[in-house]
Image (cartoon, rainbow, N blue to C red):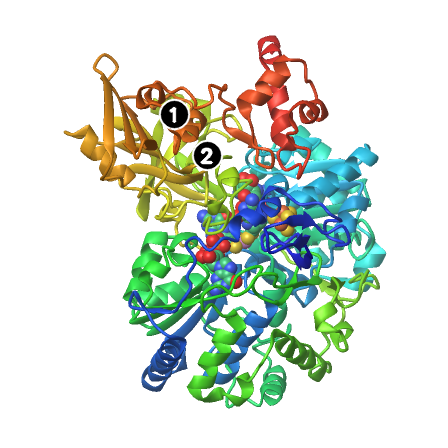
């Protein structure tokens, strides 16, 4: 079997993958991002390339159509809207998950040929504050850090980053570096404890949005302790005095940390020259996201700790091509190739190069405003490409209504059913990872090739081709006559060369003569390049700018909501949701709540909590844990309306944005919380996909089909009918058991001698081995034995999955601990857990810490 050299389609670490058409997936030992490692999501890629649920042909109004008809219709509707209402009446909402070539073509069409800048992407929800902060400080959006800097630092400060779950291979590289150099210090700044905290020497459990106060305090401390590099700041930095003055009037106690925590952190940072401050969404997704970025950059600029090995600020990108999108300029307030929309000379040069009839002259609508314009009727035609805004934007229910309000909506996706596709007039099938060719750029500016190793399914086409074909039909055939992604890439590189008279960081000359087919992972401007090494920045005078920032006003609410990611799921689960192994890690939309808050609300373990505000309402399983602080709730972002009845967390996230970047404040909002008083709780294992039909429902893939956790607010009159309705099994024989004493109901549905569905209900959360019931689906076990909850092979229940690679459950691990395994390595030897991708190692360590012996001793 020949394996194709490509890169992982998930996070911004950008790991190299060797992939085969039979589903073989290996880490690429030669890729400089991962040197052969993969995390649980990367390792399970082979399970997600089947065609189940794929959109295989264009659809118009739900009916299959041919490409000609669909493309003609899209082009006509867009052209008509532009003719009647002007270029600002159409919009594209795209994604950091399309390839650089797709992105370049979409941006060119919108800005140069339609002549408006209404193209924004989900990177607005992700990287916009970093972009804005970098531009203010450096004059360009330059990420100067490299992965080696993280390995070489003596101190790594992780701010608002759950690296262990969100950039797992980078986390493993840091863990390995720390093992080799135990003196290395890691500080984790996060309002809650996470798997990342377990690697850290110190957890600073900051108040939400306390970051500006914390880093302003650090700047003031650096000045007082004589740690400002005066020579550096005189020669290379403007604005020190103003930034310092703002910092000095800021009270570091507003960070929520005590005097000792502050003193220790400040002293360690001040006295460790080799420091990297790496940050992610806990910084970006905030009302003061841009200010947080500048507060961090200020400290690095004041000390000259930037542009040198093992030092610097490091904005970790989330999506596989978030960085590529920034490079091509695919946001509503950028032009192309790091050129400025507001600069007439830049605009003229780009227009000249594109030979375009027009060029946009002012910024377009940023994501949240774009959907507001959809709601109030300004947008007449909308094209959504490779993103699921009806789930991932704040005020998700309002956004869904806004999309429904647009007269003509197109969605390009690889999957047929998404919450956004359900609202579209036209669906265009895109080729996905493994089927398409192009380039992506990772967090350290390394451009890698994604290569196809599978044929295009059905009549799916690559995004760059679909966009070019629509542009051609709108009258721009000559400028969009691309025949391959290589041609698009060549034009993108040529645009860079044609505009080299404008000094900026982006320099793609290394790719000028590159052989696209054989392109090896390459950092721009050249491998091993170090930005700012000479102290030169990109403001006109060559200096960096320190920015005065002040701490935001506090939110006063009994409960606030923080949101983020799970280890084994990717965003709206369109791909990872296909893998039973990945689904087994955390199979329900949950809310982390502090034990004291749970007690006040009267929430027992397994209870459901209704979290709501004026925007909407969700119902989530209570995960009672001291990992979150009192008054703070945390919930994952992954559940959609396809997989849950009330688990879409953005239903309760307000559309409040950072004033400079337009990035939504997805991590900190006011909500109320109360126990959802269910009349009954249930569980289904089935060979058919259950629909989320009860007030609480969470659907997930299993090894034998599907499962659903349920709760209802009205006890059904006819349990058999309810079991059939919820499992979708209307045929077959039913075995029914009920226990009036406990109110529990057990139903098995058998077809052709095989168990097709098992349904359990009770007046309290159902306690039974899910794994055992799931294992019985499709077996010929007698219904009576099945309803007794015994597993098909009479094996013990492995428990909830901890290690997704080897499917090792919590009970198996606890048994190994009882049997004497006392270290992560020993657990690996006994059970294999953690010995493949290593993503579960923090959880193994936590499990060891919680062994009964230790708990008793505490
Ligand atoms: N498994 C998995 N990995 C992913 C993704 C995924 O969906 N699943 N998505 C990818 C993408 S697109 C992105 S953008 C990245 C995101 O990667 P991360 O930013 O690391 O992930 P999040 O879970 O969104 O948030 C990180 C942390 O910010 C903390 N936080 C909240 N508020 C504050 C605050 O005010 N201050 C500070 N200091 N911290 C705060 C949260 O408690 C949370 O632990 O992950 C990428 N990797
Ligand atoms: N509350 C809250 N909300 C958040 C966040 C948060 O932390 N909290 N994080 C935000 C962030 S950082 C991000 S990045 C967003 C992510 O949010 P989204 O971008 O909405 O999430 P995805 O599920 O990744 O959507 C990608 C879609 O593209 C499709 N797709 C995959 N490959 C291709 C392809 O090659 N071509 C095409 N045309 N389609 C394809 C998939 O099937 C899927 O439907 O969510 C944001 N929303
Ligand atoms: S860390 Fe995991 S998800 Fe991220 S690129 Fe690597 S294998 Fe993919
Ligand atoms: Mo993201």
Q: What residue is shown with label 1?
A: 606
Q: Tell me, for residue 632, which label it has, or none.
A: 2
Can residue 595 be seen at all in this image of the molecule? yes
Residue 824 drawn above or below residue 545: above
Estimate the x, y position of residue 168 in percent, counting from the top left: 64, 43
Estimate the x, y position of residue 317 in percent, counting from the top left: 62, 55
Q: Quadrant of the C terminus?
A: top right
Q: Secondary structure at mark 1?
A: loop
What distance separates the C-alpha of mark 1 from that of mark 2? 19 Å
Q: Secondary structure at mark 2?
A: strand
Position of 404 with respect to 325 (left or right) is left
Can residue 660 be seen at all in this image of the molecule? no
**Point 71% across, 52% down: residue:** 313
**Front-lying residue, 749 or 640:** 749
N-term-proximal mark, 1 vs 2: 1
Q: Quadrant of residue 388?
A: bottom left
Estimate the x, y position of residue 576 in percent, counting from the top left: 50, 47
């Amino acid at each position: 079997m020949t394996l194709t050299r490509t890169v992982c389609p998930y996070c911004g670490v950008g790991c190299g993958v060797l992939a085969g058409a039979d589903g073989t997936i290996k880490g690429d030992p030669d890729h400089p991002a991962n040197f052969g490692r993969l995390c649980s999501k990367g390792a399970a890629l082979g399970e997600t390339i089947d065609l189940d649920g794929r959109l295989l042909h264009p659809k118009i109004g739900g009916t299959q159509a041919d490409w000609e008809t669909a493309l003609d219709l899209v082009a006509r509707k867009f052209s008509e809207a532009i003719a009647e209402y002007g270029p600002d009446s159409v919009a594209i909402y795209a994604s950091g998950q399309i390839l650089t070539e797709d992105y370049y073509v979409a941006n060119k069409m919108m800005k140069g040929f339609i002549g408006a800048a209404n193209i924004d992407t989900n990177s607005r929800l992700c990287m916009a504050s970093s972009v804005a902060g970098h531009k203010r400080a450096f004059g360009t959006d330059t990420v100067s850090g490299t992965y080696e800097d993280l390995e070489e630092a003596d101190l790594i400060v992780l701010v608002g980053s759950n690296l262990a779950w969100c950039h797992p291979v980078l986390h493993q590289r840091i863990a390995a570096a720390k093992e080799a150099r135990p003196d290395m210090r890691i500080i984790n700044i996060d309002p809650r404890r996470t798997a990342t905290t377990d690697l850290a020497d110190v957890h600073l459990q900051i108040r939400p949005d306390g970051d500006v106060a914390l880093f302003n305090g650090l700047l003031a401390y650096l000045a007082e302790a004589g740690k400002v590099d005066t020579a550096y700041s005189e020669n290379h930095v403007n604005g020190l005095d103003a930034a310092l003055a703002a910092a000095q009037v800021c009270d570091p106690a507003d960070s929520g940390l005590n005097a000792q925590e502050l003193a220790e952190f400040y002293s360690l940072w001040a006295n460790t020259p080799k420091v990297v401050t790496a940050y992610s969404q806990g910084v970006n997704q905030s009302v003061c996201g841009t200010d947080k970025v500048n507060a961090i950059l200020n400290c690095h600029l004041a000390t000259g700790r930037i542009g040198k090995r093992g030092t610097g600020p490091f904005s970790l990108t989330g999506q596989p091509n978030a960085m590529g999108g920034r490079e091509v300029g695919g946001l509503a307030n950028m032009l192309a190739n790091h050129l400025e929309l507001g600069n007439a000379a830049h605009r003229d040069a780009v227009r000249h190069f594109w030979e375009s009839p027009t060029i946009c002259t002012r910024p377009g609508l940023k994501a949240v405003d774009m959907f507001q314009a959809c709601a109030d009727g300004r947008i007449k035609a909308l094209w959504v490409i490779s993103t699921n805004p009806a789930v991932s934007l704040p005020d998700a229910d309002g956004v869904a209504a806004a999309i429904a309000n647009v007269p003509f909506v197109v969605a390009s996706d690889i999957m047929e059913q998404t919450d956004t596709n359900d609202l579209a007039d036209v669906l265009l099938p895109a080729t996905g990872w493994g089927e398409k060719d192009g380039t992506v750029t990772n967090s350290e500016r390394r451009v890698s090739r994604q290569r196809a190793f599978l044929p295009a399914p059905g009549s799916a086409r690559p995004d760059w081709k679909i966009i070019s074909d629509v542009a051609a039909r709108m009258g721009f055939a000559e400028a969009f006559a691309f025949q391959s992604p290589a041609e698009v890439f060549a034009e993108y590189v040529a645009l860079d060369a044609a505009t080299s008279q404008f000094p900026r960081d982006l320099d793609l000359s290394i790719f000028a003569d590159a052989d696209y087919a054989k392109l090896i992972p390459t950092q721009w401007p050249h491998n091993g390049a170090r930005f700012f090494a000479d102290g030169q920045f990109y403001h006109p005078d060559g200096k960096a700018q320190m920015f005065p920032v002040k701490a935001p006003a506090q939110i006063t609410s009994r409960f606030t909501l923080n949101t983020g990611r799970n280890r084994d799921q990717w965003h709206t689960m369109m791909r990872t949701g296909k893998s039973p192994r990945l689904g087994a890690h955390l199979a329900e939309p949950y809310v982390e709540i502090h034990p004291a808050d749970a007690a006040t609300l009267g929430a027992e373990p397994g209870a459901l909590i209704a979290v709501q505000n004026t925007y909407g309402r969700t119902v989530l399983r209570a995960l009672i844990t001291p990992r979150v602080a009192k008054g703070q709730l945390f919930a994952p972002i992954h559940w959609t309306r396809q997989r849950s009845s009330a688990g879409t967390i953005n239903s309760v996230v307000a559309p409040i944005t950072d004033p400079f970047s337009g990035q939504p404040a997805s991590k900190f909002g006011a909500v109320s919380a109360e126990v959802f008083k269910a009349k009954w709780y249930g569980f289904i294992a089935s060979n058919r996909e259950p629909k989320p039909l009860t007030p609480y429902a969470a659907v997930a893939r299993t090894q034998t089909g599907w499962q659903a956790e349920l709760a209802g607010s009205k006890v059904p009159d006819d349990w058999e009918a309810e079991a059939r309705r919820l499992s979708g099994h209307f045929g077959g024989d039913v075995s029914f058991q009920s226990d009036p004493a406990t109110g529990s109901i057990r139903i098995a549905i058998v077809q052709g001698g095989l168990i097709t569905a098992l349904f359990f209900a009770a007046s309290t959360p159902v306690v039974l081995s899910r794994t055992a019931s799931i294992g019985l689906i499709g077996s010929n076990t007698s219904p009576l034995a099945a309803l007794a909850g015994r597993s098909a092979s009479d094996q013990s229940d492995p428990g909830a999955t901890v290690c997704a690679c080897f499917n090792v459950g919590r009970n198996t691990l606890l048994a190994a601990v009882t049997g004497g395994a006392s270290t992560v390595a020993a657990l690996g030897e006994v059970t294999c857990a953690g010995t493949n991708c290593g993503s579960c190692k923090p959880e193994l360590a936590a499990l060891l810490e919680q062994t009964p012996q230790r708990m008793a001793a505490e």
